[in-house]
Amino acid sequence: MPRTRALAHARVRATVMATAVAALLVPLAACSSSGTTGAPDTKMKPNADDRPVTVTVTPTGERVRAGEPVRVTAAGGRLTAVTVTDAEGHRLTGKVAADGRSWVSARKAVPGAAYEVTAATRSGAGTARTTKAAFTTAAAGQVNKVDWRPGTGTTVGVAQPISLVFDNPVRNRAEVEKQLKVTTSNGTEGSWGWIRDWSGRDRVDWRPKAYWKPGTKVTLNAELNGTDSGAGGGWFVRDYTTSFTVGARQIVKVDLDHHRLTLLRDGETVRRIPVSGGTPGGDKRSWRGTAVLMAKEGTINMNSETVGLADAYNKMVDHSMRLTWSGMYAHAAPWNARWFGNSNQSSGCIGMSDADAAWFYAQVRPGDPFEITGKDTKGVVAPGNGFGAWNVPWAEWKGMSALR
């Protein structure tokens, strides 16, 4: 064979071999973490640390039960960020754990919502990816609502509690109480206590250990949305908030034995007023203990039949100040003028002259305590009959919390 022909065959074989080697190298380069296509080395081998991160979201599916936090976990890498948003753009906030393996929402998934979850991850090799998931929660079959006091932006007296009354029974009291956050401007000590409202409904009040300090600013954040009341109660489907300020230290002393009312402001006597309390010896007696001014209702119709006293009276009454749900008021009672200061002859209320009632009405505010004493009364104002929590000793009141 001529030399030139042998060389030509050698070149052809070399070319074929080079092409084959290059063909083998291309897929290896495509699997490498570096993305290079040069000579093979350790970076071009499949990298176990660069496998996709496995993300798990709980809950999952359609119409799942509400009332649980959203949980996101990662396997084979780390979570770097998680967002959970409902269809209205509201976010469930949370925090990625220090090891990057999990995230839990601070709030619970609420009933009747559609959620989208976006999880950003990073593999062991540093590759960033995003995973999306979605789920919906079942609608609430029954809704529980709240009536709360005091109203936001108000200035109240030093005995005003925070009071929540529920439309439906609350069986999961500890779970509900955990969602009630009270913040004060001066670290006031206080406690929730569960009681039965005069209406028969479940109620929880927060009162300080002692009367509020004047000037205290108070905020309640009731983060109840997504909380289950328990059997027969239904779900809460909204949050509630209120904030208020405590005004001057005003205390009303009512001495039924001496038929006298005294207004004290910051420890000083402002005025003494002759009064007539409830008639001794029967159902017309007044209550004793600490009652809290609930509302200034002005001129109202008072009908004895609404408080179980048959047809004793039915009249319009001026300067009416409600002290209990059972119907005890302080008010103007000019028809009883001859008894002011010397005898108790009312149907349970604390009556005074028109002039004194007008002046007194202008001085007091809801939340002011009326400390009532007297030998012949119906008994002590109960916690649920208005704001009677002050008649419960502090240690006993703390024991009425579901979180004790």
Image (cartoon, rainbow, N blue to C red):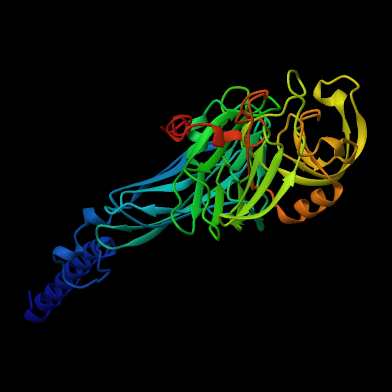
Please state the horizontal and vertical placement of residue 382, each as a whole percent of the image.
Answer: 61, 28
Observer-nearest residue: 393 or 341? 341
Quarter of the figure with residue 314? top right
Image quadrant in which you'd find residue 322: top right
Closer to the camera in the image, 10 or 296: 296
Measured as percent of width and height from the top left, residue 101 is found at 31, 49
Q: Specify the farthest residue to the front.
A: 342
How far from the left and from the top, in percent, is residue 144? 66, 33
**Vertical position of residue 265 compared to residue 25: above or below:** above
> Residue at horizontal 67%, vertical 25%?
377
Instruction: Please indicate whether residue 107 sits to the left or right of residue 27 in the image.
Output: right
- Which of 159/370 is in front? 370
Could you tell whether 168 is left or right of 58 in the image? right
The quadrant of the picture occupied by the C terminus is: top left
Residue 303, visible in the rendered structure: yes
From what the image shows, is residue 251 above or below residue 398? below
Q: Is residue 310 above or below residue 4?
A: above
Q: Is residue 172 above or below residue 57?
A: above
The image shows residue 313 at horizontal and vertical percentages of 90, 28
Residue at image x 86%, y 48%? 354
Identify which residue, 403 or 283, lies in the foreground: 283
